[in-house]
Image: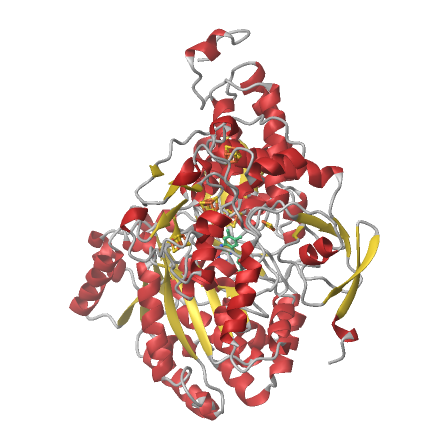
Amino acid sequence: MSGEANVRTLTVDGEEISARADQTILEAAREHNVGIPTLCHLEGLSEVGACRLCLVEVKGARRLLPACVTRVEEGMEVTTHSPKIDRYRTMILELFFAERNHICSICVANGNCELQSLALTLGMTHVEIPYQYPQLPVDASHPRFTVDHNRCVLCTRCVRVCSEIEGANTWGVMGRGAQSLVITDLKEPWGDSETCTSCGKCVQVCPTGALFEKSSVGSKVRKHPEFLPYLRIMREEDQA
Amino acid sequence: MNVEELQQIAGSAQEEREKFDYEVNVCMGTSCLSQHSDKIRDAIAKEASACGKSCHVRRTGCMGPCAAGPMVMIEPAETRYGHVREEDAKDIVAALGGEPVARLDPQLGSYFEGQNFVVLENVGHIDPEKIDEYIARGGYEALLKVLTEMSPGSVIEQISKSGLRGRGGGGYPTGLKWDTVAKVKGAQKYVICNGDEGDPGAFMDRSVLESDPQRVIEGMAIAAYAIGANKGYVYVRAEYPLAVQRLTVALREARRRGFLGNAICETTFNFDIDVRLGAGAFVCGEETALIASIEGKRGMPRPRPPYPAVSGLWGDPTLINNVETFANVAPIIRHGGEWFASMGTARSKGTKVFALTGKIQRTGLVEIPMGMTLRQIIFGIGGGVADGRKFKAVQTGGPSGGCMPEEHLDLSISYDALISAGSMMGSGGMIVMDDTSCMVSVARFFMEFCMTESCGKCVPCRAGTVQMFELLTKITKGEATHRDLDRLTELCEVVGATSLCGLGQTAPNPVLSTLRYFKHEYLAHIEEKRCPAGVCEFSATAADTRRGEVHV
Ligand SMILES: Cc1cc2nc3c(=O)[nH]c(=O)nc-3n(C[C@H](O)[C@H](O)[C@H](O)COP(=O)(O)O)c2cc1C
Ligand code: SF4
Ligand code: SF4
Ligand code: SF4
Ligand code: SF4
Ligand code: FES
Ligand code: FES
């Protein structure tokens, strides 16, 4: 197949761009420095389309489409920002904040949190809907790491990295609806997990203060979710 | 199996029937069975042999008017008896060939007027566990015709011509769906029958599986031939034990008669079906969640595309249709697509089965031609609102649908008309409400359902349904403000527009439709701290601030 056949031309916010046929709208847009907010997406992990922050308008489509899972198509006309989309995104963020307990000033991730910075970039200045404060447990049984469910946004990045990259399959999701919780093994304390290798990948990819390294409390240690693509490339080279 | 053999089976089943002067059909659908209709059948059989009447006593599936059950129907006279008890066996048998037992008249009035049986054509006439009785009524003629005379393409052409649309709720054109799966390249393809039926109050698919399971199997086999699949699954809720049992027996019988397995009807076509039990989560009825569940994973929806037609079960092209959709297939092939398209409206063809429930005289299972008005169903077939009360609204589409007021009673049923009235066809639940129903509470009930059934994957649905439920609760307690109502409206818009799957996307519908037609009830709760239907109880503080007279 010729290279030409694999190229798609589309417009993003009125700008014509070209992309590879196997790319998603998100990938194509980011390559051309068009910012689309994301939370559940992380380069190097499979896509789940769960946070709905990356929804964009595609001309002719009946509904908004998640940019992280939607492939580019020839002639596609994509709008990544409009008053309506921005309003939806702000409301989605409000739902995230109100769902559990996000008081940034007392959080380990303060200043180093993707949810917080999304709120800043998208101009979500206050939460008008009532906080749920479900009073969820904190599991500090692991010698190095802690999980605080009150800050979890259920993005399942931890679940995916642990299964897709580390291969340990320690994390899972239990329950449904608002009762959903990420759990280690069969809801045993993390410290008792026989599958966890203590590699720390889940902590690195967690976008919020839900997973953190005990030693980082009080200090301003940054997380490094950007390591993943390199790790993945290295693994693929290993296998080749 | 070939045409002659099929005719032979049909012939001997017919001969078997003709040996008897009378047939006594006893309904053993879930509702009648729960009132011990099996004992009634035994009593009638015993009585008949005791007095030497030539009569065949048969168990059947749900006959429709469940509220009048346990039901018994005598053939050939087509006499129906209702509220039958074991003690009535003697009189029923004695009356065979004479005057019907007057006190057992089920008072069905115009219940059957205007009903049109396609999906339910065998209901009340056959024993669901006897394949030969199905064959005697034309069963498997269509499969045989398809395998011996028709190309897969011409089968799809007939289905397209019929105008059949998916009965699982969405109304996607069935012919188009089959055509898509048929055209996708793939050595392995699957056919899945969606029998998850999780809407509160719905029991159409359960009834079809309980009373005529062979019809669904035949439809699936025809679909498999048309799209090139060799393996099928029926996904049924574990809470439907009778449906599971009858389906399992039916599959065994179909294999025994050679309609499933290898070299079906002496052709090169191979196809078999397995049953998979659903764990009972409503969201497992969503096609991608259902597929994940069959694969042994957590039943959670995933973004589409890719659609199951392209990448479904185990990543292979998969056709997924609803029970009732498959149940329409054999009659379409037997009588032709044009015959089917002659029933219904311009864009909604054929019939639709509804479970008629709520504050109505005659509840039960009905099958009506598309295009019938709500008024005809509710006031004709259903006999109007129960206890002489006043009609307020009719709800269709379950938690994805909406409530329509009196002004819409003359609406002709079709996919499009229901959507423009703010509701949905859904899978066929139809709930009638009278003036004792509070519409805010109704919206709250459905929101609670969506909230509890949300799988939790995406935030608009997971967190949005909780927020909407709380706002509705606030309204029903008389504690809400206009600002809360605005917030509710905004949440409806965002949750509907941004949720990942149909559950979240349609969860706002019950609120939106009640806001559209019954906004005054919302306002009465908010401004006057008053529930027009007298359902909601207000807290003391709310009562204090209530303006005007105290409502008792
Ligand atoms: C939350 C949810 C629940 C659903 N439940 C059912 C169900 O119980 N039965 C069903 O046939 N379709 C159900 N559907 C629709 C299916 O996803 C799918 O569209 C349908 O089975 C396709 O069959 P049809 O084209 O014959 O209607 C549901 C959809 C959603 C979003
Ligand atoms: S997790 Fe992020 S958004 Fe939540 S409280 Fe901590 S810093 Fe704030
Ligand atoms: S530390 Fe590593 S192995 Fe343990 S749960 Fe996290 S990702 Fe999985
Ligand atoms: S713990 Fe962190 S990574 Fe895991 S689901 Fe929650 S927010 Fe996402
Ligand atoms: S809309 Fe609701 S049920 Fe559907 S994926 Fe999202 S959370 Fe799950
Ligand atoms: S980033 Fe696309 S849905 Fe989360
Ligand atoms: S179950 Fe007997 S009439 Fe419905």
Q: Which residue is nearer to you in this view: B405 or B273?
A: B273
Placement of the C terminus of chain B among the 4 image quadrants: top left
Q: Position of residue A109 (x, y in %)?
A: 50, 36
Placement of the N terminus of chain B among the 4 image quadrants: bottom left
Q: Which residue is nearer to you in this view: A87 or B282?
A: A87
- In this rendering, the answer to whether B396 lies above or below B123 is above
Q: Position of residue B86 (x, y in %)?
A: 21, 54
Q: Which residue is nearer to you in this view: B160 or B23?
A: B160
Identified at 49% across, 91% down, the residue is B268
* Residue B383 seen: no
* Image mark count: 0
Q: Which residue is nearer to you in this view: B153 or A194?
A: A194
Which colour scheme appears in the figure? secondary structure
Asked whether, in this view, residue B321 is left or right of residue B158, the answer is: left
Identified at 43% across, 29% down, the residue is A133
* Residue B252 seen: yes
Identified at 31% across, 61% down, the residue is B242
- In this rendering, the answer to whether B105 lies above or below B513 is below
Q: Position of residue A79 (x, y in %)?
A: 76, 48
Q: Position of residue B111 (x, y in %)?
A: 48, 50
**Residue sticking out furthest to the left:** B50
Identified at 52% across, 23% down, the residue is B475
Quarter location, residue A124 = top right
Quarter location, residue A19 = bottom right
- In this rendering, the answer to whether B13 lies above or below B540 is below
